[in-house]
Image: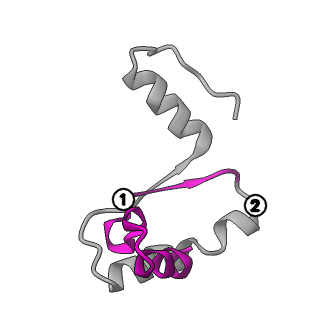
Amino acid sequence: MVRPAAAARQKGVLGLDTVALRIGFIMYLHSDHTLGLPDVMLTTWIMGRKEPLTIERIPAAIRRAQMSAGKQEAKSNC
């Protein structure tokens, strides 16, 4: 994830600056979605990330968005 984002940034995709990465999303807890997580955390820090990196599972992210929209009762089935 970090290397493709850095390559895209070098080609002008400003939104994929690895140093500016603040949040990551994991769709589900399978190895094909989580094995690169240590690389994302360490490499972005080595490259100069100063802010904490938040990792969310998609159900938690949906719940947080619903809560911030005033739907405090929102729940996830996951």
At x 24% / y 71%, what residue is drawn? 50
- Measured as percent of width and height from the top left, residue 60 is found at 54, 38
Q: Please say which color scheme the image uses.
A: one colour
24 vs 38: above or below: above
- Measured as percent of width and height from the top left, residue 74 is found at 54, 18
Using residue 51 as the reference point, say whether residue 16 is left or right of it. right
Which labelled disc corresponds to residue 30? 2
Residue assigned mark 1 = 22
Residue 75 inside the magenta-drawn segment: no
Q: Quadrant of residue 11?
A: bottom left
17 vs 45: above or below: above
Which amino acid, by three-letter code, is at mark 1?
Arg
Q: Quadrant of residue 15?
A: bottom left
Look at the image and give the residue range highlighted in magenta: 1-28
In this view, which residue lies farthest toward the bottom? Answer: 46
Mark 2 element type: loop
At x 45% / y 73%, what residue is drawn? 41
Q: Residues within 10 Å of mark 2 (few under 14, many from 20)?
A: few
> Count the marks: how many?
2
- Measured as percent of width and height from the top left, residue 45 is found at 34, 79
